[in-house]
């Protein structure tokens, strides 16, 4: 009985790992208006995906402290099919949250967002 329970637990664990969304993982952002970038950890949050800033880097690529570390940069993000995702993305350099369109292609992620008809190209993020 103990062996059966462990086997079932392992199968359930592997099934969950196999079902991970391709967007999940660590992403290095493009440089912002100040030349800064960050590492975003994307993981499930409820029925959507969210991305939290876990490290910040200055224009020279050196790790720096930031009040935004720990903040959700990506939120309410849901797959639309064909590598496209829609949700929200927060831009620390402009202190704005945009309606986002993310396009996943292999290990790159094109990030774009709009708010009140004003759109911004968030550049290309790379998987780490």
Image (spheres, grey):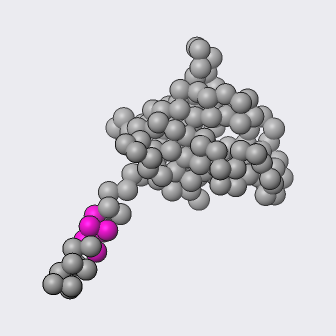
Give the quarter of the image for residue 62. Answer: bottom right
Magenta-highlighted residues: 10-15
Residue 54, image x and y in percent? 65, 54
The residue at the far front in this view is 1
11 in the magenta segment: yes
**What residue is at 39 percent from the left and 51 percent from the top?**
21
Image height check: is 11 above or below 29? below
**What residue is at 46 percent from the left and 38 percent from the top?**
77
Give the quarter of the image for residue 6. Answer: bottom left
The residue at the far top in this view is 117
Residue 15, image x and y in percent? 28, 64
104 in the magenta segment: no
Image height check: is 80 above or below 127? above
Q: Can residue 125 be seen by looking at this rendering?
A: no
**What residue is at 80 percent from the left and 42 percent from the top?**
35
Question: In this image, 86 relative to 82: left or right?
Answer: right
Residue 12, image x and y in percent? 26, 67
């Amino acid at each position: 009985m103990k062996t059966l329970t462990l086997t079932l637990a392992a199968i359930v664990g592997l099934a969950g790992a196999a079902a991970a969304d391709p967007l999940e993982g660590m992403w290095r952002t493009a440089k912002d208006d100040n030349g800064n970038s960050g590492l975003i950890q994307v993981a499930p949050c409820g029925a959507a995906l969210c991305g939290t800033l876990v490290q910040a880097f200055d224009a020279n690529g050196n790790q720096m402290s930031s009040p935004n570390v720990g903040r959700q940069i990506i939120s309410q993000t849901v797959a639309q099919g064909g590598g496209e995702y829609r949700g929200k993305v927060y831009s620390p350099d402009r202190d704005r949250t945009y309606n986002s369109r993310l396009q996943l292609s292999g290990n790159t992620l094109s990030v774009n967002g709009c708010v009140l008809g004003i759109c911004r190209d968030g550049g290309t993020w790379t998987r780490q």
